């Protein structure tokens, strides 16, 4: 909490209205012993918690028939603004509380427990008693609120248990809850099925990845297969080129004599034409020879006329036969030449084959380069087999997942049905609340322990820094032991002044919004006091100091109040 305003009216030594306004940083109240410094602290606890120490209505006010006292304070806590006012008179005690300007009937104790508030108010005369005082350690470390929540939950748990018929019967009731056991078994089975589904889904994802990898390999194998087919075509073409090359070598002589062969064939063809003509002529001659020979032997013409009576006699016929034989001999001279022309024609046909040796050579070299490259053996059959196996496995696992999900849905329905049946039992509802309370208590225990651990580390670090700065033994006193409220590695008894310094260091190590110290430098020597003055502003966001002498602390702040005392009326006022 942080104080904003404190208004005292007719409270103890203070007569009339006396107002204090506090700011962040250091605030100082100066007054001699007996002027009311401690009374101001008491008034705050009166306003908040109704704490009364003796007769608290001012005597001078009573003499003036003002038989009441009133204390009002404005403060902030956890982001909210509060106004608490308490009044005491002959008519009794009245208390008013506003939260963010809205009236409330809740108690301050439920907002800020008194034991927690005490940690912000210290009497310098007895501040060293904080050392070794373990009761408020939880408040100091900021876990008191959590412990209070835990206590409330434990009380709730006990009340719930009392609504049943006793702890022993609770256990018997649990044992008799067959439905609950069945639900538990079903939940375990549900958990196992979920794990199986998770495993199957994970395996399906793995199979998907493996299939994708096999597809990549298959794509490469198809490329290799295509290259292998191309190699086959190239080998066939290579053999064709070899054959063409051999054919070129065989016909090289004919190719060289191509022009001469063409002329020879041309001459042969001319002779052939001439021979045909002569053959035709020879046929006619032979026919004429046969006719004339027949006429000459028979003595008659083909018409039956005797040769002796015709215009041609035997002598003329004989002359005709001699001329025909002469013509026939001329035709027979070209017979051998004509019969040898087939070889030349065949040679010319070979010359007509179109073969380019340079083209053959270039193409063969290109093919040889491709064929000389090593081609790995095809694994396509193995890849296809593996791919199909993975696909079959994936499909089988998908079907298995469908079966498991169907089974899971049935189990969920059974669990829901049994839970609905259990919910109708009033005792079960109470038991469920008890179980929830137990879980919450366990969680709070863990949170409290972890919070204490972290707070101890943070507090020890800051408190040790203050101690090393303020103490006269910085090399010997190196740190604060929060757990034992002592200085680390020190077994000897501390003096009152050292306990005072340790306590102030410890208070500075605890993160607080406000700290109020009455007579903070009591029991401190000049060296300790001088060093502590530098650390005062770091003790909390708001520091209120009450002291008899402000000469050494007036430089810390401009927000200074002075207590003045009227000895005649025996009252004090704040100026």
Image (cartoon, helix red, strand yellow):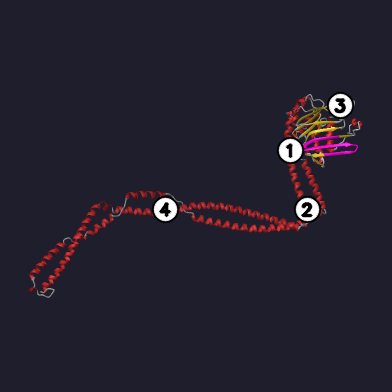
Quick check: 113 above or below 209? above
Q: Which residue is mark 4?
A: 231
Label 4 vs 2, first from the N-terminus: 4
Q: Which residue is mark 3?
A: 565
At x 48%, y 53%, the residue is: 221
Quick check: 101 above or below 401? above
At x 76%, y 50%, the residue is: 436
Chain part drawn in magenta: 70-96
At x 9%, y 69%, the residue is: 318
Q: Nearer the viewer, mark 2 or mark 1?
A: 2
Q: Is residue 76 magenta?
A: yes
CA gap, disc 2 to disc 1?
36 Å
Say few, some or many: other residues with alpha carbon within 10 Å of mark 3 (under 14 / 14 to 19 / 20 or more): some
Asked if labels 2 and 4 touch by Cβ distance under 8 angstroms, the answer is no
Q: Nearer the viewer, mark 4 or mark 2?
A: 2
Image-based side of 284 in relation to 184, left or right: left
The label number, if any, that marks residue 455 in the structure image: 1
Q: Is residue 177 visible?
A: yes
Q: Which residue is mark 2?
A: 431
Residue 35 percent location from the top left of the image: 85, 28
User: Could you tell me which quadrant the N terminus lies in?
Assistant: top right
Residue 161 percent location from the top left of the image: 81, 51
Image-based side of 106 in relation to 182, left or right: right
Say few, some or many: other residues with alpha carbon within 10 Å of mark 2 (under 14 / 14 to 19 / 20 or more): some
Which quarter of the picture shows residue 95?
A: top right
Magenta stretch, overall SS: strand
Tell me the element at label 4. helix
CA gap, disc 1 to disc 4?
80 Å
């Amino acid at each position: 909490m942080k104080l904003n305003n404190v208004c005292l009216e007719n409270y103890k030594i203070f007569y009339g209205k006396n107002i204090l306004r506090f700011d962040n940083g250091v605030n100082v109240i100066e007054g001699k012993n007996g002027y009311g410094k401690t009374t101001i602290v008491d008034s705050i606890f009166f306003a908040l918690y109704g704490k009364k120490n003796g007769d608290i209505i001012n005597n001078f006010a009573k003499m003036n028939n003002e038989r009441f006292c009133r204390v009002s304070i404005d403060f902030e806590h956890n982001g909210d603004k509060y106004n608490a006012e308490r009044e005491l008179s002959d008519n009794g005690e009245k208390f008013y509380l506003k939260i963010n300007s809205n009236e409330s009937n809740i108690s301050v104790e439920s907002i800020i427990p008194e034991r927690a508030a005490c940690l912000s108010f210290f009497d310098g005369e007895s501040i060293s008693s904080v050392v070794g005082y373990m009761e408020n350690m939880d408040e100091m470390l900021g876990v008191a609120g959590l412990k209070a929540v835990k206590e409330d939950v434990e009380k709730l748990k006990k009340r719930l248990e009392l609504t049943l018929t006793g702890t022993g019967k609770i256990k018997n009731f649990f044992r008799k809850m067959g439905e609950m056991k069945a639900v538990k078994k079903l939940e375990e089975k549900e958990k196992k099925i979920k794990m199986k589904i998770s495993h199957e889904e994970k395996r399906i994802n793995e199979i998907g990845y493996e299939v994708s990898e096999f597809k990549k390999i298959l794509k490469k194998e198809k490329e290799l297969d295509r290259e292998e087919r191309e190699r086959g075509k190239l080998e066939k073409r290579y053999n064709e080129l070899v054959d063409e090359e051999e054919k070129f070598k065989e016909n090289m002589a004919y190719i060289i004599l191509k022009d001469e062969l063409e002329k020879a064939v041309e001459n042969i063809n001319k002779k052939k034409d001439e021979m045909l003509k002569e053959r035709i002529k020879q046929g006619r001659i032979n026919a004429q020879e046969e006719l004339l020979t027949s006429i000459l032997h028979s003595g008659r013409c083909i018409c039956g006329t005797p040769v002796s009576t015709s215009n041609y006699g035997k002598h003329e016929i004989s002359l005709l036969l001699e001329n025909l034989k002469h013509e026939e001999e001329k035709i027979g001279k070209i017979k051998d030449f004509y019969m040898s022309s087939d070889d030349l024609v065949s040679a010319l046909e070979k010359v007509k084959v179109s073969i380019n040796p340079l083209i053959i050579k270039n193409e063969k070299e290109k093919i040889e380069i491709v064929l000389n490259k090593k081609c790995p053996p095809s694994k396509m059959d193995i890849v296809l087999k593996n791919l199909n196996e993975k696909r079959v496995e994936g499909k089988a696992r998908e079907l298995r997942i469908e079966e498991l999900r169907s089974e899971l849905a049935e189990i969920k329905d059974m669990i829901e049905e049994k839970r609905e049946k259990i919910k109708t039992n009033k005792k079960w509802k109470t038991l469920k609340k008890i179980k929830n309370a137990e879980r919450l208590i366990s969680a709070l225990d863990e949170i409290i322990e972890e919070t204490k651990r972290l707070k101890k580390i943070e507090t020890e670090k800051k408190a040790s820094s203050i101690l090393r700065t303020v103490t006269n033994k910085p090399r010997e006193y190196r740190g604060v032991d929060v757990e034992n409220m002592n200085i680390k590695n020190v077994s000897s008894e501390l003096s009152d002044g050292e306990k005072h310094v340790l306590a102030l260091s410890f208070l500075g190590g605890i993160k607080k919004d406000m700290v109020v110290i009455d007579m903070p430098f009591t029991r401190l020597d000049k060296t300790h006091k001088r060093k502590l003055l530098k650390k005062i502003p770091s003790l909390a966001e708001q520091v209120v100091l009450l002291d008899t002498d402000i000469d050494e602390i007036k430089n810390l702040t401009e927000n200074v109040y002075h207590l003045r005392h009227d000895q005649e009326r025996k009252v004090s006022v704040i100026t």
